[in-house]
Amino acid sequence: MRFSINIPNFGDFADARAVARVASAAEDAGWDGLFIWDHVVHYKAERRGTPFGDPWMLLTAAALATSRIRLGPLVTPVARRRPEQLARQVATLDAVSGGRVVFGTGLGGPVEDEYGSFGEPTDARVLASRLDEGLGLLTRYWSGQPVDHDGQHYRVRDVTLLPATVQRPRPPVWVGGFWPHRRPIRRAVQWDGVVPLFTEARHGVVPPLALAQEVISYVRSLRATPIEIVLGGATDPATAADTIGPLASAGATWWDERQLQDSADLDRLAPVLRRIESGPPAL
């Protein structure tokens, strides 16, 4: 199992220098990855007055401060971005980092705030269709080959985006979605990683073993070849190995250390650094 740190792109982490400090500390302490949220307003009634940073600027700062750990968004909503611009951002970060990008994606949310606030569609079926078509376009853009495309949502005429990504044929793509909904998991198994979220265990809550086993079993029923399975939550360093060990035995391949979403520490640098400096558990 590998271990990552997960931080939002607001509060203290709107400052790229704070993110660079987190990334450097994570690498020094033996973590394997740093993943950053991609939100514009999040829950805007709650976050009003809170500073936000652009995730790609933050990830660039993290890349320049490190040499080993994996980096990426978790998750970027393809449906609210232009695929051609997103392809450029990912390829640039992949070059800056020396091929260390993991591209985490999903529908994103909360939909009414993140999409509806800007006049974007909020129908989940439309957003899912944009996500699927957009992902297909991204992989073609990252190839460095000419792209022509006529789709339901996007049209492209004779475009070649260079440079291609450092990682070939492309960076790993991880897809998030809420279990027990099956469609997001079916989407994810077509790519390189599944990031299950749970309606019964919200962000930062360690998923119960039975729930984790349920979704891992479903993933394996759909795909026999290896795929990353990413679980996460907030752990106490003293008991983290006991908490995470059974999940690793069940088949999880990454543990993503997260603050509780309703915690005052969610977007504060000092408590996150304390958890980072305690290091990942030895399983």
Image (cartoon, rainbow, N blue to C red):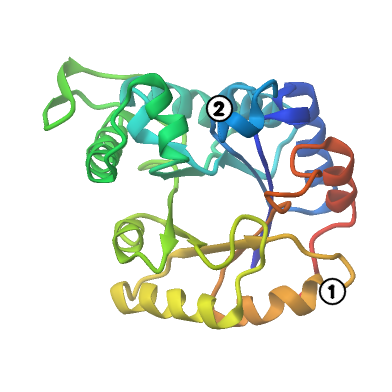
Q: Residue furthest left?
A: 150
Callout 1 secondary element: loop
Q: Residue furthest front?
A: 45
In the image, 59 versus 210, the foreground residue is: 210
Q: Disc 1 or 2, which lies upstream in sequence?
A: 2
Q: Position of residue 83 (x, y in %)?
A: 32, 26
Left or right placement of residue 140 versus residue 188 in this view: left
Left or right placement of residue 112 versus residue 83 in this view: right
C-alpha distance separating marks 1 and 2: 34 Å
Q: Which residue is mark 1?
A: 239
Q: Which residue type does callout 2 highlight?
A: Val
Question: Taking the image as drawn, is residue 187 in sight?
Answer: yes
Label 2 crowd bin: few (<14), some (14–19), many (20+), radius 10 Å: many
User: Quadrant location of the N terminus?
Assistant: bottom right
Q: Is residue 282 above or below residue 130?
A: below
Q: Is residue 100 above or below residue 51?
A: below
Q: Is residue 226 above or below residue 132?
A: below
Q: Position of residue 141 (x, y in %)?
A: 29, 28
In the image, 191 versus 45, the foreground residue is: 45
User: Quadrant location of the C terminus?
Assistant: bottom right
| Residue at image location 60% in from the left, 70% down from the top | 207
